[in-house]
Image: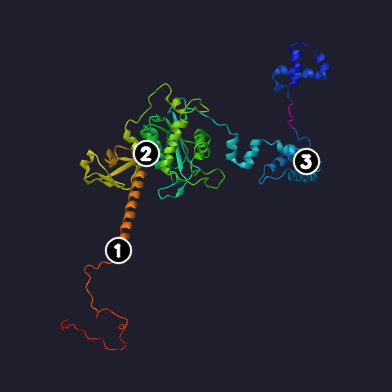
Amino acid sequence: MAKAALLRRHLDDGVPLTRLAEDAGVPERTLRRWAAAYRREPRVAGLQRRPRSDRGRRQLPEDLVLVVEALALSRPVPTTAFIHRRVCDLARDRGVPPPSYSTIRSIVTAIDPGLRTLALDGEAAYRNLFELVHRRDAARPNEQWQADHTLLDLQVLDARQRTARPWLTVVLDDHSRAVVGYTVFLGEPSAELTALALHQAVSRKTNPSWPVMGLPDVLYSDHGSDFTSARLERVCLDTHTRLIHSRVGVPQGRGKIERFFGTVTSELLPHLPGYIPHGTRAQPATAPTLTLEQLDGTLERFVVEDYHARPHSETGQPPVARWLGDGWLPRLPAHPEDLDLLLLTAATGRKVRRDGIRFAGTRYVSTVLAAYVGETVTIRYDPRDAAELRVYHHEQYLCRAIAPELGTDAVTLQQLQQARTARRRQLKQQLRERRSLVDALPPDQRHAPETSAAETPTAETPAPTAAPAGAPAPRHRLRTYAAD
């Protein structure tokens, strides 16, 4: 910058170079060289001193320079002092003056960082640090969705009141960064659980503040077995959705959904009981008290009331407002029953009885089932809503069977099972209390036979003794016959 300021006096104000050379104490020839370089590239960077391209190599033959680089790129990584000693020994054997330590160090530090990373850390590290990434942003809502899983840094209570770490599957709209659907579950990710998140993403939400829905043009995911399942491929074919998988071992394309996972981890989980701080070896800071159902409701409130309502740092707009835009109609399935493949399927078929279908201790009825009494059907269901079933007969959709006692309110299957378990425990407790009362009663002597004083055993009456060995057996008082 000092060179540029000096040259501006000559180029802009017309001060002769001879006068500038006297004032600055710089040779006139040097000023002329600077001025020529500044005219070729009128930038401050053009006046900077460029480092020598042969730095550290002038004192060593080229083959020994290659030896230094080869030793520096070997594994395990040797110290610079070790490389200096080895090269000095080789130089003496060849009759070459041994290099100084600074020369060896300059050669080692001048190695291309990409080459060093590839040699010492592997291809994955090189790809993450140095390979160019083609980042593509969707131009409109529902053009592309991303789907992925993460293991939450949280412990919850399962149905048996045991602690477990839940998984979270999220479907995210690429354009607006809005959460289209999600599901939380225990156990490893599977195609069925991923399909539930996608089913919620496509369907209309019961929460009016969550309007995101419809079908995407592209569904982008990794190469997990749940995303490459035949069930998901069939749904994408039926709904005209392209299923694209990222390259194996290349997660850069899923950075947007990874960022949402980071938002959940940093802004929601630390405020919940059972949160596991980073680096604590899965030990929660507080005792876990949340159930999986309570965590599901907390996540929905965080997404709808917090994440969707505030401006996104990259787009500058709230995700829901960016998804809605100026108003448009999302693409929906031509046949709503096509999405039923995304629901859970009962492990065994159910027989249609005269009063409907029995599943999970609940009766489901429909007028269509009147023609299929005695037939075995297949049912699919949403564990978040146990009020209805989808019924199939020979892979053909029949109807939706409704539970009359659950039809007005949405009840999850877990709620239903917990309610039955609680009722059973209550009845068992009552039964134990009643039985304990009966056991505490005195013995019933109302119709007991009266015993005379002679029959009452006393202390003076000797107890009957066993017959000695070898004594004849007592004769029977009951008269018997030869035929007996």
**Residue at 18% over, 82% down:** 478
**Residue at 31% over, 89% down:** 470
What is the quadrant of residue 192 in the picture?
top left
In the rendered view, tell whether residue 282 sits above or below residue 145: below
Q: Image quadrant for the C terminus?
A: bottom left
What is the quadrant of residue 197 in the picture?
top left
**Residue at 34% over, 54% down:** 429
Question: Which is in the foreground here, disc 2 or disc 1?
Answer: 1
Residue type, label 2: Leu
Examine the rendering and report whether any part of residue 173 can be seen.
no
Residue type, label 1: Leu
Q: Are marks 2 and 3 in contact (CB under 8 Å)?
A: no
Q: Residues within 10 Å of mark 1 (few under 14, many from 20)?
A: few
Q: Which residue is mark 2?
A: 342
Q: Looking at this view, is 108 or 320 the one in front?
A: 320
Q: Label 2, label 3: how many angstroms apart (C-alpha)?
A: 66 Å
Q: What are the residue bounds of the magenta stretch? A: 49-53
Q: Which residue is mark 1?
A: 441
Report x, y in % for residue 181: 42, 35
Comes first in the chain, label 2 or label 3: 3
Q: Are marks 2 and 1 in contact (CB under 8 Å)?
A: no
